[in-house]
């Protein structure tokens, strides 16, 4: 498996495009998917679908002048936000004390009598399992991360793992600060601290940082992404466009969605159609991309949400928000269209623990190269192009030309799907592979290998 992903949210020197050939089973397959970029991407040739990219860090506009964006009504009338704010401020200045007294009265409901002051009732306690309750529980555990480096600056989000300031985020967020850059963390209570990188894993787009001089922080409660069900309610928390502590809600739209994202989009050709992939993947391309079996959600996720929490309605972290699908081909514009993707926490935790323990992160390998099924056929799957001698696939009896259609009960409908599914496992996991050879369907058991002793993953 040769999939690795350049984490950075800023342009990097990327390897050249690979020649036509075979995809490695663990190599991210670039294509319609593109990373939460800091780099501009080549336009997608399919305007119908746009493309997927990792959430770029929010970058402040170059101008320091104060501007106000107009809010356009359906009828075409435009009202300036600042103007509205000034009007409210003016009203507050006239008779402000009287208004304050009216709104800070007793607990009785709003009066409907013809005389006397209008009174407001206190808000009812948020019911358990509501978005309000979840937000109150999780907001103290989600931070805004500000990064500055030689190539630029921006902001993302992070999840507090430990009370001592250990924080989880995306690799492509903190990589901007590489080679002498700086990282600061804004906490929910308004405090700010500098932070250092503990370790990163470009293959899974994960990073761990440590805030300096802090203690007693509220650590997030970690859940299990394997418990999620399609249609289940979830909440996304982060700092989109630099807006701290933003909460949005939605549902789990799909599970195990194969997503490949690249941070070197200007070097990676865009392929028409949703989810289409190139026919060949070389090791050099591994440094540009990552592939994972994503949690798809319609909760609004935007640039700056990267590294933030996707939580269930018990307030448990089930995923790390990482990429979005945009309606157009631009990497400089376009926000949520209801297609957001989070890396499952079950995949993240083993990597995080290895980073914290100062170990090299390891990933599962099937040790084959694959491509989408070719020719005029109704078959779907990942067609084996080569089998590494002594690897997991070789020991399981797979041969060149076999078409893998399932891993355990997970349907494999493309080479990208196989990469993502294997990436969701750990070394030494035993999996049942369903494959087609010479028109006959058969199964075999494979014990997945590790990339610990190889440059390929």
Image: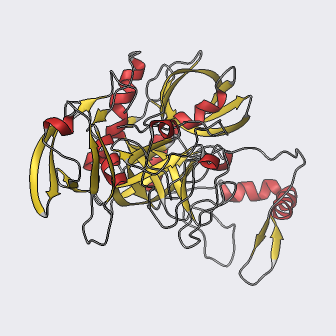
Q: Residue at x 84, y 62 (%)?
A: 91
Q: In the figure, 363 relative to 235: above or below?
A: above
- Classify residue 233 by image quadrant: bottom left
Q: Quadrant of the N terminus?
A: top left
* Camera-side residue of 34 and 64: 34
The location of residue 285, given as percent across then percent down, is 50, 40
Q: Is residue 132 left or right of residue 157?
A: left
Q: In the figure, 144 relative to 298: above or below?
A: above
Q: Residue at x 27, y 54 (%)?
A: 383
Q: In the figure, 124 relative to 19: above or below?
A: below
- Colour basis: secondary structure
The location of residue 328, given as percent across then percent down, is 62, 65
Q: Residue at x 67, y 49 (%)?
A: 241
Q: Quadrant of the C terminus?
A: top left
Q: In the figure, 425 relative to 125: above or below?
A: above
The location of residue 52, given as percent across then percent down, is 53, 56
Q: Residue at x 34, y 47 (%)?
A: 420
Q: How many numbered marks does the figure carry? A: 0
Outermost residue on the bottom side: it is 75
Q: Is residue 270 visible in this depiction of the protein? A: yes
Q: Is residue 191 visible in this depiction of the protein? A: no
* Camera-side residue of 253 and 392: 392
Q: Is residue 274 left or right of residue 83?
A: left
């Amino acid at each position: 498996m040769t999939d690795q992903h350049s984490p950075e949210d800023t342009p990097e020197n990327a390897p050249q495009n690979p020649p036509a050939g075979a995809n490695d089973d663990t190599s991210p397959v670039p294509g319609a998917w593109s990373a939460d970029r800091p780099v501009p991407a080549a336009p997608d040739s399919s305007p119908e679908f746009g493309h997927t990219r990792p959430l770029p860090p929010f970058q402040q506009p170059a101008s320091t002048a104060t501007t106000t964006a107009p809010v356009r009504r359906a009828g075409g009338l435009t009202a300036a936000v600042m103007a509205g704010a000034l009007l409210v401020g003016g009203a507050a200045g006239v008779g402000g004390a009287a208004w304050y007294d009216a709104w800070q009265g007793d607990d009785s409901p709003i009066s409907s009598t013809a005389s006397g002051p209008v009174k407001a009732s206190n808000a009812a306690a948020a019911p358990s399992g509501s978005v309000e309750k979840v937000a109150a529980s999780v907001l103290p555990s989600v931070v805004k991360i500000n990064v500055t480096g030689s190539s630029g600056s921006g902001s993302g989000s992070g999840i507090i793992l430990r009370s001592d300031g250990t924080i989880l985020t995306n690799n492509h967020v903190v990589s901007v600060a590489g080679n002498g850059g700086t990282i600061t963390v804004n906490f929910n209570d308004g405090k700010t601290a500098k932070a250092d990188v503990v370790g990163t894993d470009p293959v899974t787009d994960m990073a761990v940082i440590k805030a300096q001089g802090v203690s007693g922080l509220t650590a997030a409660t970690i859940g299990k992404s394997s418990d999620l069900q399609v249609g289940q309610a979830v909440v996304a928390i982060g700092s989109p466009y630099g807006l701290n502590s933003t909460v949005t809600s939605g549902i789990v739209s799909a599970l195990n969605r194969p997503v490949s994202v690249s941070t070197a989009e200007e070097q990676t050709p865009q392929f028409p159609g949703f989810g289409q992939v190139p026919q060949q993947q070389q090791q050099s391309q591994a440094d540009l991309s990552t592939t994972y079996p994503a949690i798809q959600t319609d909760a609004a996720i935007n640039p700056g949400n990267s590294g933030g929490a996707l939580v269930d309605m018990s307030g448990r972290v089930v995923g790390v928000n990482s990429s979005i699908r945009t309606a157009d081909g631009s990497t400089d514009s376009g926000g949520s269209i209801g297609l957001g993707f989070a890396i499952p926490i079950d995949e993240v935790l083993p990597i995080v623990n290895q980073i914290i323990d100062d170990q090299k992160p390891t990933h599962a390998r099937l040790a084959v190269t694959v491509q989408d099924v070719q020719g005029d056929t109704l078959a779907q799957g990942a067609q084996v192009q080569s089998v590494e001698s002594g690897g997991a696939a070789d020991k399981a009896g797979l041969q060149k030309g076999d078409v893998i259609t399932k891993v355990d009960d997970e349907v494999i409908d493309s080479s990208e799907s196989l990469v993502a599914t294997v990436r969701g496992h750990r070394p030494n996991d035993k999996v049942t592979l369903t494959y087609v050879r010479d028109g006959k369907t058969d199964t075999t058991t494979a014990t997945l290998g590790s990339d610990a002793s190889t440059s390929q993953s």
